[in-house]
């Protein structure tokens, strides 16, 4: 199986080969990601595992393109988010509420 970074590079190359990068605008890729999120939510509501898998992948492709157009990588953004949350303490309650430890 490929690493996430390898897949990120392959998606960027695929997008460059099709001129999505540099011809798309960041906001259009962000809007496309929201559209794909809607399809993912629909697949979740209908409990369609193959469509869920496809939907998650489509959202990630759009986010990778968005980041590339902004001079970022999704991996770097994820790393920054992890650094921000890694020391947070707390727990998720059965009702879905996250309670931070003070």
Image (tube, rainbow, N blue to C red):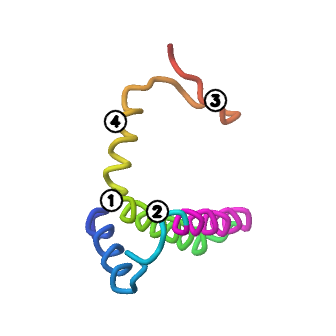
Snapshot quadrant of residue 68: bottom left
The answer to if 39 sits in the magenta stretch is yes
The answer to if 89 sits in the magenta stretch is no
The reply to whether discs 4 and 2 touch (Cβ–Cβ < 8 Å) is no
Query: Residue under circle 3?
Result: 93
Of 59 and 30, nearer the camera is 30
| Mark before the other along the chain sequence, 3 or 4 | 4
Name the quadrant of the N terminus. Answer: bottom left
Note whether 87 is above or below 26 in the view shown: above
Residue 71 has which mark? 1
As helix, strand or loop, the secondary structure at mark 1 comes to loop
As helix, strand or loop, the secondary structure at mark 3 comes to loop
The reply to whether discs 1 and 2 touch (Cβ–Cβ < 8 Å) is no
- Between marks 4 and 2, how big is the CA–CA gap? 20 Å
Q: Nearer the viewer, mark 4 or mark 2?
A: 2
Which residue shows up at 36% across the image and 74% down it? 11
Badge 1 crowding class, 10 Å Cα cut-off, few under 14, some 14 to 19, many 20 or more, is few
- Between marks 1 and 3, how big is the CA–CA gap? 38 Å
| Mark before the other along the chain sequence, 4 or 1 | 1
As helix, strand or loop, the secondary structure at mark 4 comes to helix
Instruction: Name the chief secondary structure element in magenta.
Output: helix
Query: Residue under circle 4?
Result: 83
Of 55 and 45, nearer the camera is 55
The reply to whether discs 4 and 1 touch (Cβ–Cβ < 8 Å) is no
Horizontal side of 54 relative to 96 (left or right) equals left
Give how far across and how far down residue 45 sits, in percent: 73, 62
| Mark before the other along the chain sequence, 3 or 2 | 2
Residue 63 has which mark? 2
């Amino acid at each position: 199986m490929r690493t996430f970074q390898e897949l990120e590079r392959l998606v960027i190359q695929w997008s460059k080969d099709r001129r999505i990068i540099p011809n798309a605008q960041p906001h259009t890729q962000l809007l496309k990601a929201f559209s794909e999120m809607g399809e993912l939510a629909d697949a979740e509501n209908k409990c369609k595992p193959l469509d869920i898998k496809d939907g998650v992948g489509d959202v990630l492709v759009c986010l990778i393109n968005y980041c590339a157009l902004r001079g970022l990588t999704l991996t770097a953004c994820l790393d920054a988010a992890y650094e921000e949350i890694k020391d947070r303490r707390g727990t998720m309650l059965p009702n879905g509420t996250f309670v931070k430890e003070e």
